[in-house]
Amino acid sequence: MFTQPVFYALLATIFTWGVTAIGAAGVFIFHQVNQKVLDGMLGFTAGVMIAASFWSLLAPSITLSQNSGIIPWIPPLVGFLTGGAFLWIVDKALPHLHLYAPPSEKEGVKTQWHKTMLLFLAITLHNIPEGLAIGVAFGAASLASSGATLANAIALAVGIGIQNFPEGFAVSMPFRREGMSRFKSFMYGQASALVEPVAAVIGAAGVLYMRGLLPYALAFAAGAMIYVSVEEIIPESQAHGTDSATIGAMIGFALMMTLDVAFGV
């Protein structure tokens, strides 16, 4: 029986962080990369996150709500919007700067922090919902609830791990362009994903301590993922107007959908 969700969520996100680090290590190999390739990588990331939001999180939330005897659309709706609202608050409070944006367009509270730190915080913001989603998925699986299975959680972790490889590369290159050494660019790139294990542990533990809120928690993670995808990743991938971002998103969505349907059901 699956009895250690927090530990397994931690292991899963150590894996996803490791894949990010491998991707970020691309700065040691490539001096520069075609912008279309980087845009495609970010688009791929967005596609995976959007697909995971439904198949790995919202769909189980809906199923659990239907089986609980309450109005089935209320927990998914409330959780989804609350997750989006939470990330909106974080987005407004956390000083950060979107990839490829000029310093004048920095967001969050006013600060004199260097552009490099603002970029780092923006990338870290990407990874909070990913870790949270994995943690909630493993926590839900441990409760043996209908619609939330261990296979779902593993498929989600694998999907996010796969998209973290191109994402790690895509986010480390801007640091290199800012004049950082290859080593520092790598360190910033991989460190941005260290928040994933932390968020995963919080998500898994939260589900175990508030079991009655499981449908809400799953939808909350989905709302956070969608907010980050639409607010941060998609605009960054489309900043140069290339079709590669759209193609990457389609491929990422298709891959995550296949993983979840093939192995998560």
Image (spheres, rainbow, N blue to C red):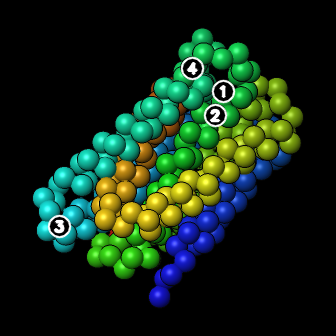
The residue under the point 72% across, 46% down is 191
Give amino acid for label 3.
Answer: Gln
- Residue at the far bottom: name it: 1
Q: Position of residue 254 (x, y in %)?
A: 39, 58
* SS for dot 2: helix
From the viewer's side, name the closer residue of 235 and 122: 122
From the viewer's side, name the closer residue of 262 and 111: 111
The answer to whether residue 38 of the structure is visible from this angle is no
Label 3, residues with CA under 10 Å away: few <14, some 14-19, many ≥20: some
Q: Position of residue 163 (x, y in %)?
A: 55, 54
> Reading the chain from its start, which is encountered first: label 3 or label 1?
3
The residue under the point 32% across, 60% down is 213
The answer to whether residue 20 of the structure is visible from this angle is yes
Residue indicated by mark 1: 118
* SS for dot 3: helix
Question: For the residues marked 3 and 1, what is the alpha-carbon distance in whole angstroms?
Answer: 43 Å
Give amino acid for label 4.
Answer: Val
Rendered image: mark on residue 222: none
> Reading the chain from its start, which is encountered first: label 4 or label 1?
4
* SS for dot 4: loop
From the viewer's side, name the closer residue of 66 and 176: 66
- Relative placement, left or right, of 208 versus 79 is right
Residue indicated by mark 2: 121
Rendered image: mark on residue 109: 4
Q: Position of residue 229 (x, y in %)?
A: 44, 40
Q: Position of residue 186 (x, y in %)?
A: 78, 44
> Reading the chain from its start, which is encountered first: label 3 or label 2?
3
Residue indicated by mark 3: 66
Question: For the residues marked 2 and 4, what is the alpha-carbon distance in whole angstroms?
Answer: 12 Å
Nearest to the eye among marks 3 and 1: give it.
3
Question: For the residues marked 3 and 2, what is the alpha-carbon distance in whole angstroms?
Answer: 38 Å
